Image: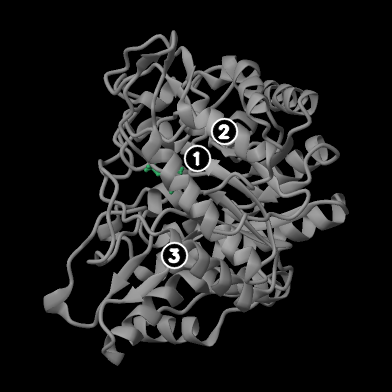
């Protein structure tokens, strides 16, 4: 096997989101976010107010332990750290005129720490954590007013951190709104009551908001690079039957539409056809059309799995997976949580995105959620997570192949570089990290951090710029 080659300056690191790590949900003037009333992840209905069984309220206490955690990332040699800013720390309700200084100061401290270790920040502006008030009073992104609130929030971030942060992502996994309107779009109306007209109008508002702040970022911070962020789920036909191939194309289009708007600045024809067939008439102003032309500088995405699609209702089986799921692929193994494992799919998606958009790409989430067991090895408390090492090795090998194919790839941030609360199931036991956090589904645990075997593996990999991949 040839040695994997990554370009000089390739960014190596990890990723988290505020609501899954910070805790301190009511500290420092923070308002409530939708996550604070979602104790069961995307599966259960939201509660009226925060409940003690919601692990995200306390997270892994990154709010107080960020310096210790960033030092561990530095020990692995991270050159980039992706994290999100909790909108409700900056604008507690989301619609205020002035920001909360204590919230801004917290992220100043995080950035200080990253600077100290020479780690480049990669900031997600909105990662499934819309302020709760925007959800209850406006039904989230259904309301056009959200564009203005989001723009004000972004202006505040750009003015405050613009000289310190180069890489920005506008919305985490923007295409997930099709499947999880509350999580992704802050829409309180239950999915079964949500009219498609309103769902697609919300999507339009988010796309306009993203383009609006991309334009703003470029005006305020000439050195800034603004990226979109999409769930990448390559969709394979279940059989070679052309009807299945077409069904797979349709399913792929539903996701690609978001990247097409972000990268090409207008709605693609197939998407307009979908709207016509659904009887959806979007309210799109001339100003909207104009602003959408502000395209992103790079495309970032999460990649965990691929799915299949078929036109045959008799063969349609619902698989489990990253928010949207799909028809299971009979050729692939799956994780303990039923997410199918497909490293080759990563090479395929990298090529597809590069061929289609010709924009630099950034893998900002990838990893294996697994049950870990703490053990003693040579006097060290650790986790022997060979399964995670194998998963990451194979996916990075596929990324290296894509680079050989000519894809321009900026970097890789492994998801949940430190164990955190799961987004879909709100569990602690679904662990992704290189660092084990002593916290459990029932809320018990000391919160102590332990280096797993993958911690050493990743440190060596980064030091060799990927050349140690097998
Ligand atoms: C992505 C999200 O969908 O997948 C993350 O951006 C999430 O927030 C990650 O944590 C893994 O999903 P889960 O459900 O295993 O936490």
* Residue at 47% from the left image edge and 21% from the top image edge: 60
Task: Give the label, 1 or 2, closer to the camera.
Answer: 1
Element under label 3?
Answer: helix
Which-is-in-front pick, marks 2 and 3? 3
Colour scheme of the rendered structure: one colour
Residue 345's disc number: 3
Location of residue 450 in the rendering, given as x and y in whole percent from the top left corner: 47, 17
Q: Mark 1 falls on what kind of element?
A: loop
Between 226 and 135, the one lying in front of the other is 226
Q: Residues within 10 Å of mark 1 (few under 14, many from 20)?
A: many
Pinpoint residue 259: horizontal percent, then vertical percent. Answer: 57, 69
Disc 2/disc 3 C-alpha distance (Å) = 36 Å
470 in relation to 13, above or below: below
Outermost residue toward the bottom? Answer: 242
Residue 32 visible in rendering:
no
- Judged from the image, the secondary structure of the residue bearing numbered disc 2 is helix
Comparing labels 3 and 1, the label whose residue is closer to the camera:
3
Pick out the residue farthest to the left.
314
Q: Nearer the viewer, residue 130 or 318?
A: 318
**Image marks 1 and 2: residues in contact by CB distance under 8 Å:** yes
Marks 3 and 1 in Cβ contact (< 8 Å):
no
Left or right: residue 135 compared with residue 412: left
Circle 1 sits on which residue?
Answer: 129
Q: What residue lies at 79% left-to-right and 28% top-to-bottom?
A: 115
**In the image shown, does 261 or 144 lie closer to the viewer?**
261
Q: Position of residue 262 (x, y in %)?
A: 63, 68
The residue where tag 2 is placed is 88
Q: What's the distance in space between the residues labelled 3 and 1, CA to CA?
A: 29 Å
Q: Quadrant of residue 44?
A: top left
Q: Residues within 10 Å of mark 2 (few under 14, many from 20)?
A: many
Provide residue 203's location: percent of width, then percent of height: 50, 64
């Amino acid at each position: 096997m040839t040695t994997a080659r990554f370009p000089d300056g390739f960014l190596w690191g990890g990723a988290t989101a505020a609501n899954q790590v910070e805790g301190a949900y009511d500290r420092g003037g923070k308002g409530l976010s939708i996550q604070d009333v979602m104790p069961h992840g995307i599966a259960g209905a939201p509660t009226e107010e925060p409940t003690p069984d919601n692990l995200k309220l306390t997270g892994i206490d990154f709010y107080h332990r960020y310096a210790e955690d960033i030092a561990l990332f530095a020990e692995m040699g991270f050159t980039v750290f992706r994290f999100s800013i909790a909108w409700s720390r900056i604008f507690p309700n989301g619609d205020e005129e002035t920001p909360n200084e204590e919230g801004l100061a917290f992220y100043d401290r995080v950035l200080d720490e990253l600077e100290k270790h020479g780690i480049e920040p990669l900031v997600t502006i909105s990662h499934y954590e819309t302020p709760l008030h925007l959800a209850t009073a406006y039904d989230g992104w259904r309301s056009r007013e959200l564009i203005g609130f989001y723009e004000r929030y972004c202006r505040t971030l750009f003015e405050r951190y613009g000289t310190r942060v180069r890489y920005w992502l506008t919305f985490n996994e923007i295409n997930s709104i099709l499947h999880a309107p509350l999580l992704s779009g802050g829409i309180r109306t239950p999915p079964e009551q949500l009219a498609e007209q309103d769902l697609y109008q919300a999507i339009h508002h988010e796309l306009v908001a993203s383009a609006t702040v991309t334009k703003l970022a470029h005006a305020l911070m000439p050195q800034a690079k603004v990226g979109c962020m999409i769930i990448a789920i390559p969709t394979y036909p279940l059989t070679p039957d052309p009807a299945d191939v077409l069904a797979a194309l349709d399913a792929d289009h539903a996701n690609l539409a978001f990247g097409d708007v972000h990268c090409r600045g207008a709605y693609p024809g197939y998407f307009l056809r979908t709207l016509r067939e659904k009887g959806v008439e979007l309210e799109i102003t001339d100003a909207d059309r104009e602003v959408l032309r502000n395209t992103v500088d790079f495309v970032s995405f999460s990649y965990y799995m691929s799915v299949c699609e078929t036109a045959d209702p008799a063969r349609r089986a619902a698989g489990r997976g990253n928010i949207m799921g799909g028809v299971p692929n009979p050729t692939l193994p799956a994780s303990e949580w039923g997410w199918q494992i497909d490293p080759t799919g990563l090479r395929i998606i990298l090529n597809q995105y590069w061929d289609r958009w010709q924009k630099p790409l950034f893998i900002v989430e990838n990893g294996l959620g697994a049950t870990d067991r703490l053990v003693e090895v040579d006097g060290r408390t650790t986790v022997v997570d060979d399964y995670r090492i194998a998963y990451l090795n194979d996916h990075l090998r596929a990324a290296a192949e894509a680079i050989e194919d000519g894809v321009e790839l900026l970097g890789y941030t492994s998801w949940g570089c430190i164990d955190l609360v799961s987004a879909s199931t709100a569990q602690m036991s679904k662990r992704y990290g290189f660092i084990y956090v002593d916290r459990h589904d029932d809320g018990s645990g000391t919160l102590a951090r332990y280096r797993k075997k993958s911690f050493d593996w990743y440190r060596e990999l980064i030091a060799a710029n990927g050349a140690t991949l097998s």
